[in-house]
């Protein structure tokens, strides 16, 4: 077993939002991974439990990672580094680095945590692994001990966090929770592929679901198929006990106009979900994924199926987009 730091509050509950389930005509359950912790909550903390354990083992004193400007992963890393007494350096992608970053949503939390933010253009971001390796070399030359975490914490080691999440769901089913039987399908938002890879491996290993439906929020199916395959290979190399994954379907039908840009219909559904269930989705990840689930329900693809929506968090990203929601009120 790989070393893991216990940083999250587990197990997260599995809930049945009754009125929402009835409105959609779906046997719907929700795994509340938006409740894995306090301000650092969401899906990233499960990956960071393994990644930061590795950083600790290497006696790192500084963590370098990257993401979009409103990255939930960068925010979780910044806050967890503060709690562990580590320095954090975040490379954040923004259209105009010279314009700076508004102090809102995840960026506000990054700053509170004392992270060093380095804004980079989308063009530079494409070479992020080189940029982070160069920063690591500089820090090492100054006597520091950096540890680099890839985008989204999505490598084989990080994906083990979602293998473990599936084991956690298996234990909940064994206790008779959520109907006690495996799910037919798990639906979740896919942004860098680590959650999908870990969930697909873990769902098969622990007989939790026959299918994992990863709703792409940015890139297309082919891209994520390639990325998730590589992460799964990487994870299996670390944990040879992992066998074949559950069926992993990458669905890019709900990705919307661009990363972090949602459609008016997706935003209207975020409002409906809040009013029917009290669940708060975000326009970057979970709102798109749930909108995809909603489309599947409307097409009749979920009738008679046991469905688990994995709520991966993302609340600060919603709070940074208030202007996009003004039209709804
Ligand atoms: C990062 C993120 C995802 C996507 O997870 P990946 O493992 O990066 O694919 C989904 N939802 C939220 C809220 C996230 O922050």
Image (cartoon, grey):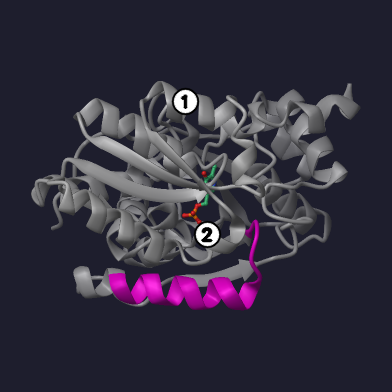
* Magenta stretch: helix, strand or loop mostly: helix
Q: Is residue 281 left or right of residue 180?
A: right
Q: Magenta stretch containing residue 285, yes or no?
A: no
Compare residues 148 and 193 and report the one nearer the observer.
148
Q: Quadrant of the N terminus?
A: bottom left
Residue designated by label 1: 109
Q: Secondary structure at mark 2?
A: helix
Mark 1–mark 2 distance (CA, rounded to whole Å): 22 Å
- Pointer 1 local density, CA inside 10 Å: few below 14, some 14–19, many at least 20: many
Magenta residues span: 216-234
Residue at image x 64%, y 66%?
A: 219
Q: Is residue 239 visible?
A: no
Q: Is tag 1's residue or tag 2's residue first in the polypeptide sequence? A: 1
Residue 164 in the image: state x and y as whole percent. Answer: 30, 52
Q: Which residue corresponds to the image point at 53% horizontal and 65% vertical from the top-left?
A: 126
The residue beneath circle 2 is 125
Mark 1: secondary structure: helix
Please state which of the two labelled residues, at mark 1 or mark 2, is closer to the viewer.
2
Label number found at residue 324: none
Q: Confirm whether residue 184 shows in the render.
A: yes
308 or 109, which lies in front?
109
Q: Is residue 295 left or right of residue 144?
A: right
Residue 94, how many percent across, how many down? 61, 47
- The residue shown at (34%, 35%) is 11
Reply above or below: 308 against 276: below
């Amino acid at each position: 077993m790989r070393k893991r730091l216990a940083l999250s509050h587990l197990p997260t509950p599995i809930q049945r939002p009754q009125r929402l389930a009835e409105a959609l005509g779906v046997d719907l359950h929700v795994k509340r991974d938006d409740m894995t912790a306090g301000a650092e909550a969401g899906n990233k903390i499960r990956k960071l439990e393994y990644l930061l354990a590795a950083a600790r083992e290497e006696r790192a004193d500084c963590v370098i990672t990257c993401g979009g400007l409103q990255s939930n992963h960068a925010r979780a890393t910044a806050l967890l580094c503060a709690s562990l007494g580590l320095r954090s350096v975040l490379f954040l992608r923004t259209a105009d680095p010279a314009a700076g970053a508004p102090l809102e949503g995840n960026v506000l939390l990054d700053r509170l945590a004392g992270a060093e933010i380095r804004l980079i253009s989308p063009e530079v971001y494409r070479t992020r692994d080189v940029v982070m390796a160069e920063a690591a070399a500089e820090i090492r030359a100054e006597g520091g001990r950096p540890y680099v975490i890839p985008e989204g914490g999505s490598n084989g080691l990080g994906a083990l966090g979602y293998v473990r999440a599936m084991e956690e769901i298996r234990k909940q089913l064994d206790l008779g929770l959520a109907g006690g039987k495996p799910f037919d399908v798990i639906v979740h938002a896919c942004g860098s592929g680590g959650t999908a890879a870990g969930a697909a491996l873990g769902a098969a290993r622990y007989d939790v679901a026959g299918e994992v439906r990863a709703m792409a929020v940015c890139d297309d199916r082919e891209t994520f198929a390639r990325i998730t395959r590589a992460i799964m290979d990487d994870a299996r190399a670390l944990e040879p006990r992992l066998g074949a994954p559950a069926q992993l379907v990458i669905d890019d039908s709900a990705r919307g106009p661009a990363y972090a840009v949602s459609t008016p219909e997706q935003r209207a559904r975020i409002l409906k979900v809040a009013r029917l269930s009290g669940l708060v989705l975000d326009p970057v990840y979970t709102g798109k994924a749930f909108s995809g689930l909603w489309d599947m329900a409307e097409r009749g693809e979920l009738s008679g199926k046991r469905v688990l929506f994995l709520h991966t968090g993302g609340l600060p990203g919603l709070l940074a987009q208030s202007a996009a929601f003004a039209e709804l009120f």
